[in-house]
Amino acid sequence: MLYHLLYPLHELFSPLNVFRYITFRSAYATVTALLLCFIFGPPLVRRLREIKVRQIIREEGPRSHLTKAGTPTMGGVLIVAAIVLPTLLWASLENPYVILATAVTLVLGGLGFLDDYLHVVRRAPKGLLGRYKLIVQIAVGLGVGVVLYLHPTEPTLATATTLPFTKTMVLDLGLFYIPFVALVVTATSNSVNLTDGLDGLATGLMALAAAAFAGLAYVSGHARLAEYLNIPFIPGGSELTIFCMAMFGAALGFLWFNSHPAEVFMGDTGSLALGGALGTVAVMLKKELLLVLLGGIFVAEALSVILQVLSFKLRHKRIFRMAPIHHHFELKGWPESKVVIRFWIVGVLLVLLSLSTIKLQ
């Protein structure tokens, strides 16, 4: 919005020419997101306490988590707002990829809000039934797939994805690309949701992933840098840098209140939106398979649940003391803060390893 309002005036007032630069607008999108969290976070937490929107702790969870009962939840509304508003302020609203990423964030944030509302406010034991959530997530993913199939970010890679650790190899999926996109968006959304079980865990990891994808978006949308790094050039992709930096700022700002001991939880409102947004950005940048490595902690959390369920059904034995895997380490005696920080450290290593896959010519 500010870009469309102020940049056209640069011929009359030359300092406004700064609005043409992605770096400038990305920086201020981050600052805007942080300020939104810092300003509106405290009153939101107070309001959630007043209306008794409080976390319900599962009895089968770690006993140490019983002290978290009563902590306000649904704080994800702040995250969604801190992503969407800075994006609308600082990004080009003529860019279809920014609009698509924002739309996915809002839809999945709304889905998470409905689930949180039914579970916490209406006291429905399971909130919104899992199959209904899955239907909406898959529908959103299919919608993204269809849009990108009809209007690809890179026409020569319309139905293909790049392969990490290779210079020129791609995997062309043809018509299967649409369900592949749905799988990526749905799986990422649910993986972040499963990771959100300890104070600050998912929030910190999302900040890392968002920052990494901001860098990838910038170089992918810059013709000369993309050629130099031998990666696909995505026309208009650099505008996603602003969206990713807004997501980075929102995650950092929310972490201020979500760090141990958490004052508020994001709930499904935040986790489903963040995961869906991350998956959508990865798809648009043709980095779907790199996301598996870059977001390796999210993948490990989801796999631990899948393996635990399969093992119990087939062998009547558990692989982990508890799933997702962060609870396994808690039950081994690791303090919650140590689990979180160690997972963050692994997350940093995975981000660095992922970025190293960009081959220099």
Image (cartoon, rainbow, N blue to C red):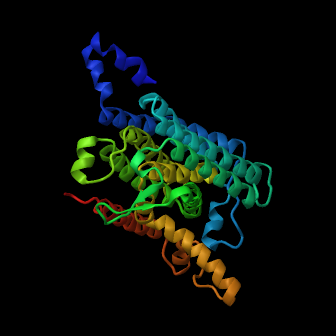
- Residue 19 visible in the snapshot: yes
Q: Residue 298: percent from the left, percent from the top?
A: 50, 64
Q: Quadrant of residue 359?
A: bottom left
In the rendered image, the vertical position of residue 8 relative to residue 288, given as above or below: above
Count of picture labels: 0
Residue closest to the eye, 37 or 333 = 37
Residue closest to the eye, 160 or 269 = 160
Quadrant where the image shows the C terminus: bottom left
Q: Residue 178: percent from the left, percent from the top?
A: 57, 54
* Side (left or right) of 27 relative to 47: left
In the rendered image, the vertical position of residue 75 relative to residue 57, given as above or below: above
Residue closest to the eye, 201 or 182 = 182
Q: Residue 166: percent from the left, percent from the top?
A: 31, 65
* Side (left or right) of 145 relative to 294: right
* Residue at (43% x, 58% y) in the render: 161
* Side (left or right) of 354 relative to 144: left
* Residue at (51% x, 77% y) in the render: 329
In the rendered image, the vertical position of residue 341 relative to residue 251, given as above or below: below
In the rendered image, the vertical position of residue 297 relative to residue 14, given as above or below: below
Q: Residue furthest left?
A: 361
Residue closest to the eye, 216 or 229 = 229
Q: Residue 331: percent from the left, percent from the top?
A: 56, 79
- Residue 71 visible in the snapshot: no
Q: Residue furthest top?
A: 12
